[in-house]
Amino acid sequence: MKLRISRPHIRVAQGESAFAAGNARWTNRDLDPIAKNGRKWGVRSIIAYWISDALNAATWQFASSMIAVGLTYREALGIIALSFFIISLVIAANGTVGAIYHVPFPVIARASWGFWGSYIAIVSRVILAVFWFAIQNVNGGNAVHVMIGAIWPSFLDIPNDIPESQGITTGGMVGFLIFWLIQVPFLYMHPNKLRWLFTIKSILIPIAWVAILIWSFVTVKGGGGVFAKQAPTVSGFKFSWLFLANMTSVLGVYATLSVNQSDFSRYSRVSSRWQLLYVPTLPILFTFFSFIGIAASSAGQAHYNLSSVPWDPTVLISYWPNRACRFFGAASFALASLGVNISANSLSAANDFTALAPRYISIRRGQIPCNFLSFMSAYAIFLGPIAAIMMLDFWVINRRRYDTLALYQPNNPIYRYTFPIPGLSGKSISGINWRAVVSFVVGVAPSLPGLANSVNSHIDVGVGVHPFEFGWLLGFVATSIVYTLLSWLFPVQETRIDRAVLPDEIYDRGTVVEGMEADDLDRKDMVADTREKDTEVEKAV
C-alpha cells in the first residue's frame, strides 16, 4: 500500500457561509456572525481572558522606560492607571458591538468605512498585531532559553556563532525556535477551544507573580532602590511632555484591542452590559501587575548587587540560584507570552488576514504569517483615529443600529456609500465612506513628522515631534470631532435604519440569504415578525 501525501495548496478551501451567500471576499464561514451554539464565553471566561492578557513581560516592564527618563515609580503607576482607564472605555465601547451583533472587527469596520474603505482599518490593525506578535515571540524565546539553562546548565555555555550585531546568541535562537514550535499547534485551535488555556494561565501565573512579589519584600526590606525616596528630576514643561509621551506609549500597547475587541466579544453568551466590566478591571489589573514588575526588579538589583535594574524578568530569573525556581519562574513567562500571542495578536491578525485574502488565508492559516514578520514602529497613531471612527459611528451616528445582513452584501445600498466624482458627470465611487477617510487623515497627519523622526532620528522636525508624543490621544479626539461633524453635515440616509437587524433573526429562518433580492423582499416580512427584538438591543446596551 502506497502512502499518499497530499500536496500543500496555497489556496484555502473556505467554508461556505451559513449566513449570507456571496463572494468569499465578503462572506465566508470564518467571518460569519457567531451562532447561538457557538457563543460560549461567559463572565468567568472574560475575566480569565483579561487576567491572562495582562500577565506578560510587557506589562512587567511598563514602568521601566518611565523611571529611566526621570519619573518616580508613583508617577509611573499613575500614568499606567490613567492610560488603562482611558483605553478601557474605548475597548468596552467597541467590544459592545461584537457582543450584540457577534461579528468580527473586519465586518464591523464595513459599517463606518464601507466595504472597500474597511481595508484601511484592517491593514492598519494587522500590521501592529504582527509587530506585537514578534515582540512576544522574543520574550517567550528568552524564557525558554532560561528554562533550558535551568535543566542543563551547560547549555548556557554553548559557543555563540551569531554575530553580535544581530542582537541574539545561538542559545537565544534555540530558545526562540523552540517557543515558536510550541505555539504552532495552538494557532490551529478555534478560539472557543482555547478558553482552558486562558483559565489555566489566569490561575497559575498570578500565583507565580504574587510569589515573586512576596520574595521581593522578604529578601530586600523596603523593596530596593527604586522605592527609595526620590526627589523629582523633571518638572514643568518637560514633565508635561514626558507624561503625555509615556501615557501614549502605554495606550499604544493596547490600541489594537481598542479597535478589534469584537473579535473576542463576538463569542460572548452574556449581556453586552458585561463589557463595562473592563472599565474598573483593566486599570486595577495592569497597575497591580506593573507594580510587581517594579518591586521584583528593584529587589533583584539590591539583592544581587547589580549595576542596573534588571527590568527584563528573564534576566532577573537567571540570577536565581535554585534551578527548579529558575525553571518554573521562566515557564510562567513563557506561558504568559504564549497566551498573549494567541489571544491578543495572532487571532486578531487571523481575522484581518482572512478578510484581506480569503482565497489564500483561513482563520487558522491566518495566524501563521505573524511568525515571520515584524514591524518596528510607533504605529499606534493610526489606531486611535480608527477606534474613534468605529465608536462614534455605532454610538452617536447610527444610535447602536446596524443591519447585520447588509454588512455581508456589498451591493446593498445601506453600507455601499456611493458618492459622485467631482467634475465627472454621471461617474461615482462606491464602497468607501469618504467621511471616515478624511477624518482619519486629519487625525493622523499631525503625528507624521514625529513618526518620521522616530524612524530616522536624523530627520529634524523641530517642534513637529510633540504631536507624535501624544499621537494616539490627539488622533482619537481630532478624528472624533471631524467624523461627527462630517456625518451630521453630510448625512448618509441609507445607514439611518429604523431598527437593528440582529444575526439571530437571519439564523432563525434556517436558510442562507441570497443576494439583494432576499435582502429587499424577505427582510420586510422578517421585520414584521421580529420588531420586539428592538427592545433586546436597547436593554443590552
Image (tube, grey):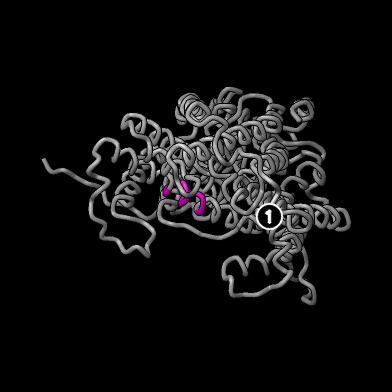
Residue 408 seen in the figure: no
Residue carrying label 1:
245
Q: Residue at x 77, y 56 (%)?
A: 479
Which of 22 and 241 lies nearest the eye of the viewer?
241
Circle 1 packing at 10 Å, graded few (<14), some (14-19), many (20+), is many
Amino acid found under the numbered disc labelled 1: Ala
The part of the chain drawn in magenta is 131-138
- Which quadrant: the N terminus? top left
Above or below, 131 relative to 47:
below
Quadrant of the rendered image containing residue 272: top right
Q: Residue furthest bottom?
A: 423
Q: Residue furthest right?
A: 489
Which of 169 and 361 lies nearest the eye of the viewer?
169
- Which quadrant: the C terminus? top right
**Helix, strand or loop under label 1:** helix
Above or below, 384 relative to 518:
below
Above or below, 525 relative to 461:
above
Q: How many numbered discs, if any? A: 1
Examine the structure image and report whether residue 237 is included in the region drawn in magenta: no
Q: Is residue 335 left or right of residue 226?
A: left
How far across and how far down the image is residue 147, in percent? 33, 38
The prevailing secondary structure element of the residues shown in magenta is: helix
How far across and how far down the image is residue 386, in percent? 69, 53
How far across and how far down the image is residue 176, in percent? 35, 48
Q: Is residue 190 left or right of residue 72?
A: left
Quadrant of the rendered image containing residue 121: bottom right
Q: Residue at x 22, y 43 (%)?
A: 154
Quadrant of the rendered image containing residue 86: top right
Which of 536 and 84 lies nearest the eye of the viewer?
84
How far across and how far down the image is residue 229, in percent? 66, 40
